[in-house]
């Protein structure tokens, strides 16, 4: 008896869908082609929003719910963590969009977010997985689309020091925070901690504008403080450079336009754990004024130490979660590889 009921229900459901999706009579139901309207899209991280359309070749006879999967190299809202915030979110139901009755189009609206990482371009891959009701809807072409999410504009600060040699070794690190003084300290934003004597560089990226709510800070009108840590090593003195390189429209500015600053530490600047405020020592500052990077200071060398005033700051480095702001660079993007040769 139960089996019979289920079967009856199925027949009724199919019958209803057939009637609703049919406009050419009972014998030849109208078929509908469902696809993405474009197979590729391009956007910048700082664009804010992007609309992606799924289209039918004819007006929908009733509301059609299209489900799609999300893949690609970006981090979506379901994958995001404190240390790996989302690159984008779906404004609406994640993985689902409706083509309303009488319309040919359903619009997937994506919110795109900035981050303080200089990355190689990322991808968002969307693929239609099902449609409901499915009767007479054909998924034949353009079932997938790829969005190329391009790195936004900003500035790279590159810290470099001599290679390990018979003259010595050094391991430096780089932290960037918002706020030039202890009074204006507003958390560590980002850092670069390649560990060991085999690396002689660190770098951070500060976006020109910042779209999103992850940090809740005004990137475009702030002073930035940079910490160049002499973490460990034997160079005494240790000469280093900080190079400011603007990144615009997918390219680093020419070498002649970059600003290079020189600093020199001694063994006294090797990182020491001492308590007090501010929690980072600042060796250099610069500003972002309305999207222009300006007022880069000279490098100031502290009498001793070079970075922290609290072991808590080391915790920030270890787990990336404290203050919810710091993300440590762990991957050298291809577009920076020429810089560190
Ligand atoms: Ca990104
Ligand atoms: Ca980025
Ligand atoms: Ca390092």
Image (spheres, rainbow, N blue to C red):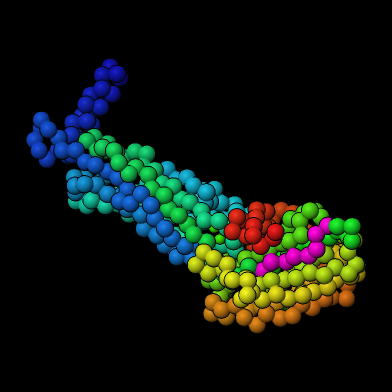
In the displayed structure image, the side of residue 165 where residue 6 appears, left or right: left
In the displayed structure image, the side of residue 230 where residue 285 appears, left or right: left
Q: Position of residue 61 (x, y in %)?
A: 18, 45
In the displayed structure image, the side of residue 286 where residue 38 appears, left or right: left
Q: Position of residue 186 (x, y in %)?
A: 67, 72
Taking the spot 71% from the left edge, 53% from the top edge, the residue there is: 319
The vertical placement of 308 against 30, above or below, is: below
Q: Position of residue 62 (x, y in %)?
A: 21, 45
Q: Position of residue 221 (x, y in %)?
A: 58, 78
Q: Nearer the viewer, residue 280 or 19?
A: 280
The vertical placement of 286 against 158, above or below, is: below
Taking the spot 81% from the left edge, 55% from the top edge, the residue there is: 197
Residue 48, quarter of the rendered image: bottom left
Taking the spot 52% from the left edge, 56% from the top edge, the residue there is: 121
The vertical placement of 136 against 245, above or below, is: above
> In the rendered image, is residue 187 in sight?
no
Q: Which residues are magenta?
A: 157-164
Q: Is residue 287 magenta?
A: no
> In the rendered image, is residue 25 in sight?
yes
- Count up the numbered dots: 0
Q: Nearer the viewer, residue 118 or 213?
A: 118
* Quadrant occupied by the C terminus: bottom right
Q: Is residue 160 magenta?
A: yes
In the displayed structure image, the side of residue 109 where residue 200 appears, left or right: right
The vertical placement of 145 against 27, above or below, is: below
């Amino acid at each position: 008896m139960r089996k019979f009921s289920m079967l009856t229900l199925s027949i009724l459901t199919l019958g209803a869908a057939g009637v609703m999706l049919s406009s050419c009579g009972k014998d030849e139901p109208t078929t509908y082609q469902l696809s993405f309207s474009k197979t590729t899209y391009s956007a910048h991280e700082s664009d804010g929003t992007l609309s992606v359309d799924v289209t039918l070749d004819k007006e929908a006879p009733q509301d059609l719910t299209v489900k799609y999967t999300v893949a690609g190299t970006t981090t979506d809202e379901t994958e995001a963590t404190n240390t790996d915030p989302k690159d984008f979110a779906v404004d609406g139901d994640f993985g689902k969009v409706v083509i309303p009755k009488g319309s040919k189009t359903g619009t997937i609206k994506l919110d795109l977010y900035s981050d303080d990482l200089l990355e190689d371009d990322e991808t968002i891959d969307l693929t239609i997985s099902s449609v409901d009701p499915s009767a007479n809807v054909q998924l034949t072409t353009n079932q997938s689309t790829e969005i190329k999410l391009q790195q936004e504009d900003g500035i790279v600060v590159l810290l470099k020091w001599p290679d390990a040699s018979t003259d010595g070794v050094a391991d430096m690190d780089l932290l960037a925070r918002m706020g030039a003084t202890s009074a204006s300290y507003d958390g560590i934003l980002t850092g670069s901690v390649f560990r060991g004597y085999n690396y002689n560089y660190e770098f951070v990226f500060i976006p020109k504008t910042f779209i999103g709510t992850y940090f809740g800070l005004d990137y475009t009108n702030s002073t930035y403080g940079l910490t160049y840590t002499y973490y460990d090593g034997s160079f005494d003195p240790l000469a280093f450079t900080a190079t400011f390189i603007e990144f615009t429209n997918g390219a680093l500015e020419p070498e002649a336009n970059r600003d290079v600053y020189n600093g020199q530490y001694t063994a006294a600047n090797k990182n020491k754990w001492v308590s007090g405020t501010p929690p980072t020592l600042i060796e250099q500052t610069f500003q972002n004024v309305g999207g222009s990077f300006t007022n880069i200071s000279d490098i100031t060398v502290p009498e001793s130490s070079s970075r922290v005033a609290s072991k808590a700051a080391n915790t920030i480095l270890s787990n990336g979660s404290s203050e919810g702001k710091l993300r440590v660079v762990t991957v050298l993007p291809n577009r920076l590889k020429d810089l560190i040769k």
